[in-house]
Image (tube, coloured by chain):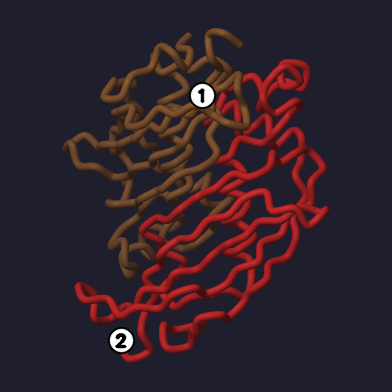
Chain colours: A brown, B red
């Protein structure tokens, strides 16, 4: 468990890997993003994606699961107030994803003296080391003194 | 279906409503964000959320579903390259959510002459008209001429 005081700018964290399953792409899309290019391989060919691609929100959810299961364990949990999200390449069935994280900023919290603010850049890569997604959230992390 | 040429800055769109279900919060969290404050009401009391709250990625996914089911139908589908995401208030079991959208910017695409770039601010509100989440994605939308 890492308290605010344990973090340093430039610190890096790694996750395990997860394999993207075609049926999970369709299942997530049917529930949350039912657009043809996430549901049907034929329809996806004619789309901007040129083939079946995971919903960006599914990619984001898979990134979160990789990070939650990793060595990155801020005290109080991974609780973000938001950040900049970028989808750079389609996530395809069979892709093997992992996340590399780097601490980019540390700040005191004026409104919450028991927490500090940790900004982290999350980069999700596929099996060809292509960056498919980035997210740079601001997290609230408990201070050791709290 | 709305082509790039059909959009105008300031244009507004509305969605229907969806009710947040406690069991769906737990189901999503178990799969993608298994942290105690998304899974267990007792554990959540002791967290920063002060009670059970949906994963931010679940909130984002619910927002997407509301928008996909709405009158907002850009030609080619809702395809974003990313944007700024903010979680402002916890989403709770029993909340009734809706999304208000406003077109904030329109640009030609240099690299893609058949598409234009539409920036839209999505605001998700609960039954008390509190903003719980915002997302301002950049979308690629087909031109009528394409």
Q: Residue at x 42, y 88 (%)?
A: B5
Q: Residue at x 44, y 69 (%)?
A: B119
Q: Residue furthest bottom?
A: B145
Quarter assignment of residue B21: top right
Cα–Cα span, label 1 and label 2: 50 Å
Q: Residue furthest front?
A: A110
Which residue is disc 2 drawn over?
Answer: B146
Secondary element at tag 2? loop
- In the image, residue B73 sits, relative to residue A124, either above or below, namely below
Specify whether B52 is left or right of A74: right
Question: Which of A102 and B40 lies nearest the eye of the viewer?
Answer: A102
- In the image, residue B38 sits, relative to residue B17, either above or below, namely above
Q: Residue at x 46, y 66 (%)?
A: B78
Quarter assignment of residue A122: top left
Q: Is residue B88 visible?
A: yes
Which residue is disc 1 drawn over?
Answer: A116
- In the image, residue A25 sits, relative to residue B31, either above or below, namely below
Q: Residue at x 21, y 34 (%)?
A: A127
Residue B144 point in image, percent of width and height: 38, 89
Q: Is residue A23 visible?
A: no
Quarter assignment of residue A110: top right
Residue A108 point in image, percent of width and height: 49, 26
Question: Which of B70 and A104 lies nearest the eye of the viewer?
Answer: A104
Specify whether B22 is left or right of A139: right
Label 1 resides on the chain identified as: A
Give the quadrant of the C terminus of chain A. Answer: top right
């Amino acid at each position: 468990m890492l308290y605010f005081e344990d973090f340093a700018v430039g610190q890096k964290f790694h996750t395990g890997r997860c394999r993207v399953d075609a049926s999970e792409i369709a299942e997530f899309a049917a529930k949350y993003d039912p657009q043809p290019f996430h549901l049907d391989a034929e329809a996806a060919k004619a789309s901007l994606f040129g083939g079946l691609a995971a919903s960006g929100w599914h990619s984001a959810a898979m990134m979160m699961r990789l990070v939650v299961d990793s060595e990155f364990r801020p005290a109080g949990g991974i609780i973000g107030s938001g950040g900049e999200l970028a989808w750079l390449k389609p996530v395809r069935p069979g892709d093997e994803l992992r996340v590399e994280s780097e601490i980019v900023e540390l700040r005191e919290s004026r409104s919450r003296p028991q927490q500090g603010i940790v900004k982290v850049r999350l980069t999700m890569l596929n099996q060809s080391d292509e960056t498919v997604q980035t997210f740079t959230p601001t997290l609230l992390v408990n201070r050791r003194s709290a």
